[in-house]
Amino acid sequence: MIGGFRVSQMIRTAALLKICDRLASGPRDSADLAAEVHADPGLLHRLMRVLVGVGVLEEGADGRFSNTEMGELLRTDVPSSAAGMAAGLLQDHSWKAWAQLPRGVVEGSIPHLLGNGASFWEVLARDPETSARFNAQMVSQTTVFVPQLLEAFDFSRCRSVIDVGGGNGALIAAILSAHPDLRGVLFDLDTGLAGAGELVRRRGVADRCTTVAGDFFESVPAGADAYLLRFVLHDWDDEHAARILRTVRPAMTPGSQLIVIDHLLPARADTSPDSRASLIIDMHMYVLFGARERTEREMRKMLEAAGFEVERIAMTVPARTIVARAV
């Protein structure tokens, strides 16, 4: 575990150079790949050999390299691709933020601000390439999660849905694709909506999806049957998360439902994979945003204080799907 950061950066490098994409058609010589990706031949060869050591690639008797089953997941053109996560999660600004974790814990400061002199969102706003990688990371996570959401909530009962803080539209586009009679609104800041128009057109739902720019601390569009908050509340401390809920509540009509998708912390920490994943993401949210995940009890309390009643919690993974109604 101590040495995990080294493997992370090697996988990140492979993702940025699209090594596994270039091996999709079969074994390749590292020197050929080096010329193709404009890398140092000797160093790329060494990188690919160590990727063999961690199970991403394999080296044949002829010295050529090919993808393993794990390596296939780093291709950008396969279902459940991890390439977006590898390139997006390990960006330089996040790396610098995690380096400040010791100081942040001692001082009670936000590590991302300490390491970058700017908030997470400020970094994305000033660097289109970094923002694009983050959006690709979110799209890859959404692609994996959507089938679970469609199983957990019956959108066929709705006429309209609003994705609050929905970014470039990957989630609402997938929902609309699965329900041809449904109409949607994608709501986010102007910067968050970058690329949304192209994505919903590419998914064939542009005629049923309206993009609206705005600030969810001020107001959200009214009158939908369902409101989505996916990975929104965990970006904020309790005060700001509660404020978002208080903004959404007045926009809802009688009978409309709120769907909150977030990780839930265990009441007591243990070593189970589910517990470990949520505890790690909780610290990740602190490092990047000064924010946090919440236990089921904390989430219920916050929703009730904002005028909601939790109807059920679907055990989707890695995040839970909380269905609530306005009261």
Image: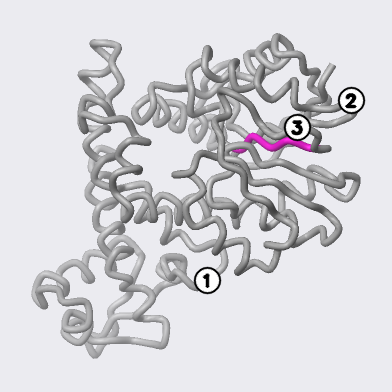
Kindly identify which residue carries mark 1. Answer: 78
User: In the figure, 233 relative to 126: above or below?
Assistant: above
Of discs 3 and 2, which sits in the foreground? 3
- Of the image marks 3 and 1, the number of the one nearer the N terminus: 1
Marks 1/2: CA–CA distance: 42 Å
Query: Which of 43/213 is in front?
Result: 213
At label 1, the amino acid type is Val
Quadrant hosting residue 161: top right
Q: Is residue 206 left or right of residue 47?
A: right
Marks 3/1: CA–CA distance: 38 Å
Question: What predominant SS class does the magenta segment belong to?
Answer: strand
Q: Secondary structure at mark 1?
A: loop
Residue at the location (56% across, 23% down)?
217
Which disc, if any, is residue 254? 2
Q: Secondary structure at mark 2?
A: loop
- Of the image marks 3 and 2, the number of the one nearer the N terminus: 3
Kindly identify which residue carries mark 3. Answer: 222
The colour scheme used to paint the residues is one colour
Q: Which residues are magenta?
A: 226-230
